[in-house]
Amino acid sequence: MRMNRDLRRDYLQAIGIESWVRRGAPGAQAEVIAHVPPRAVPEGPERESGVDWPELESRVAACTRCALHATRTQAVFGVGSRAAQWLVVGEAPGAEEDARGEPFVGRAGQLLNSMLRAVGLRREEVYIANVLKCRPPGNRDPSPFEAAECLPYLEQQIALLKPRILLAVGRIAAQNLLRTESPLGRLRLHVHHFGRSQVPLIATYHPAYLLRTPADKRKAWEDLKFAREVCARV
Ligand code: SF4
């Protein structure tokens, strides 16, 4: 599918990088939005590692593996297509996500949606989750223990989903997934691989950060185009 150029321009404008649309530039004609048709949803129970989606969701909802269970309103499992090729992974639920039970809502969620649309993806056709399923009080960074306890749930989600690409959104998500303390600036625009499945992982900025630092939206756009290219060739 080639995304309508006017529509894409609108999305780029929505994320504040309209200057990236080079009307009439030679490269503009040549650029093709890579798109691979969605995979069919497997028939019957989706099983991997002895757990299916409903069971995994129940386990997360009832989880008490770390202290965050005591302060959460609810666990935030994830949302989106279970046939998605893109898995977007953030850090942890914030106050609004904790209240609504869905990751990436509010202004940051709207910006994420716009970023996805800029590369031809609707929110409904990706899967969105966090490293941590429960909100750290005061939105503090996850502790290493909390991240280690919760990460197996994400690994099980990946085993069920089998995404073509993982987009790590924000420094905390990227550092936890890649087990590194390298700054995000060094992690972006490289193809990393995650977990047993070695799914390609691309790191980019968190939309909440981009709302505070709009000058970096241009870099996020580079990251998303890079991720789109990587997804098209895996
Ligand atoms: S953050 Fe993860 S490990 Fe901790 S209680 Fe919630 S679901 Fe369990």
Image (tube, grey):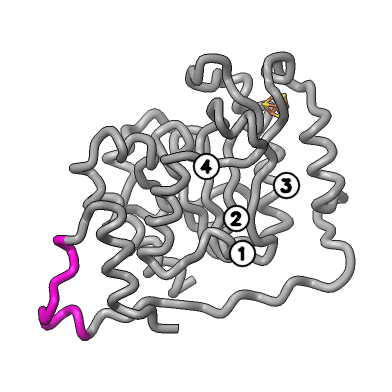
Question: What residue sits right under mark 4 in the picture?
Answer: 104
Mark 1 and mark 2: span between their CA atoms? 6 Å
The tag on residue 138 is none
Residues drawn in magenta: 19-29
| Label 2 vs 3, first from the N-terminus | 2
Q: Mark 2: few, some, or many residues within 10 Å (few <14, many ≥20)?
A: many
Residue underneath mark 1: 84
- The x, y position of residue 115, in whole percent, is 38, 56
Earlier-in-chain disc, 3 versus 4:
4
Instruction: Say what secondary structure mark 4 lies in.
Output: loop
Label 3 – label 1 distance at C-alpha: 15 Å
25 or 7: nearer the eye? 7
Image point 23% across, 41% down: which residue? 214
Residue type, numbered disc 2: Tyr
Report how far apart the C-alphas of labels 3 and 4 lie in the structure.
Answer: 20 Å
Q: Earlier in the sequence, mark 4 or mark 1?
A: 1
Residue ID at (56%, 79%): 37
Q: Are marks 4 and 1 in contact (CB under 8 Å)?
A: no
Residue drawn at (71%, 54%) of the image: 159
Whichever of labels 1 and 2 marks the residue nearer the N terminus, that label is: 1
